[in-house]
Amino acid sequence: MKAATIFDLTGTVALVTGASSGLGARFAQVLAANGAKVALVARRKDRLDALCGRIEKAGGTAMAIEADVLDRAAMLRAFDETHQAFGTVSILVNNAGAAQGVRALDMTEEEWRRILSLDLDSVFFWSQEGARRMLAAGVKGSIVNTASVLAFGAAKGVTAYAVAKAGVVQLTKALALELAFKGVRVNAIAPGWFVTDINRAFLEGDKGEEMKRSIPMGRFGAEGDLDGALLLLASKAGAYMTGATIIADGGQVVRIG
Ligand SMILES: NC(=O)c1ccc[n+]([C@@H]2O[C@H](COP(=O)([O-])OP(=O)(O)OC[C@H]3O[C@@H](n4cnc5c(N)ncnc54)[C@H](OP(=O)(O)O)[C@@H]3O)[C@@H](O)[C@H]2O)c1
C-alpha cells in the first residue's frame, strides 16, 4: 500500500475547532492539503477567514464558522452549516482549548469551571453531536481530540487544565468503546510544548530555556511535528486504532530524572 493512498482524505468532511490559531490552524491546513473539505470553527472570524483564504489559495476547500464551543446552539449551527456546504462531518477534531496560569489555592470556582467546561465538557458535547450525526448518516468517522502531556503529569499553576486533559484521555477511551462497533473511531493526540498563543509569553520568557533543556529531544515542538499523528488518526491508515492517545512530546513524559 502506498502512503499517499492510505493517508488520502479525498471525500471526507472535517470540522476543526480552535482553527483560528496555533495547532488547530495547522491541523486544518494539513487535512485540507490531503483532500478533506474543512470547516474552520472558532470565535475570531477574521482569523478563520484569513486561513480559509490561505487554504483555498493552496488548492483546498474550507469554510469559516464563527462559534464559541461552549454555546450549544452555535455548535448545532456549526454542524448544520458544514452539512449544508460539504455533507456530514466525518472527521471531527476537538482542538479548541485554553490554559490558565494560577496556583490551585488561588483559583476561584468560576475559573475552575471555565477551564473544565472549555477543555473537557466541550470535547464531550461536540463528540456526542458529531457521532450522532455520523451514525444517523451511516458515515464511518474519526474523532480526534487534542489532549496534552499534562494529562500524564502535573505542573504547577495548571491544575484545572491538567485535570481536564486527563479527562480528555479517559473520555477518548470511553467514547471509543461505545462507538467502535458503530464505525466511529475516537482517538487523541497529546502534544508536548509547542509555542503558540496559549503559552508564548511563558515559553519565550525566562523559564523557556530551562524548560527546553528538560525535554529529552532538547527542543519545543515545531510546526509539522503533529502532522503525522493527525493524518494517521484521521485516515484509513489508522483504521484499526480507537481509544488511543498518541503522545508527541520529544520524550517529555518518559523522563523521570
Ligand atoms: N501549544 C501547546 O504547547 C499545547 C500543548 C498541549 C496541548 N495543547 C492544546 O492544543 C489545543 C490548541 O492550543 P494552541 O496551543 O494551538 O493554542 P492557541 O493558539 O491559543 O489556540 C487555541 C484555539 O482555541 C480556540 N478557542 C479557545 N476558546 C474557545 C471557545 N470558547 N470557543 C471556540 N474556540 C475557542 C481559539 O480560538 P478563538 O480565540 O478565535 O475562539 C484558538 O483557535 C488546545 O486544546 C491546547 O490545550 C497545546
Image (tube, rainbow, N blue to C red):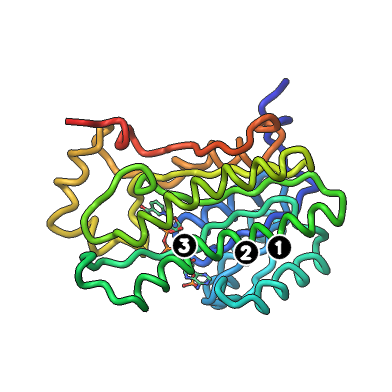
Q: Is residue 215 left or right of residue 2?
A: left
Residue under the point 77% across and 58% down: 132
Check disc 1 and give the amino acid type. Glu
Residue 21 point in image, percent of width and height: 47, 64
Check disc 2 and give the amino acid type. Phe
Residue under the point 80% across and 65% down: 83
Determine the image quadrant of residue 2: top right
Lower position in the chain sequence, tag 3 or tag 2: 3
Toward the viewer: 177 or 157?
A: 177
- The residue carrying mark 1 is 129
Above or below — where is 58 with respect to 110? above
Above or below — where is 211 with respect to 66? above
Residue 89 point in image, percent of width and height: 75, 57
- The residue carrying mark 3 is 119
Label 3 CB, ligand 1: below 8 Å? yes
Toward the viewer: 160 or 205?
A: 160
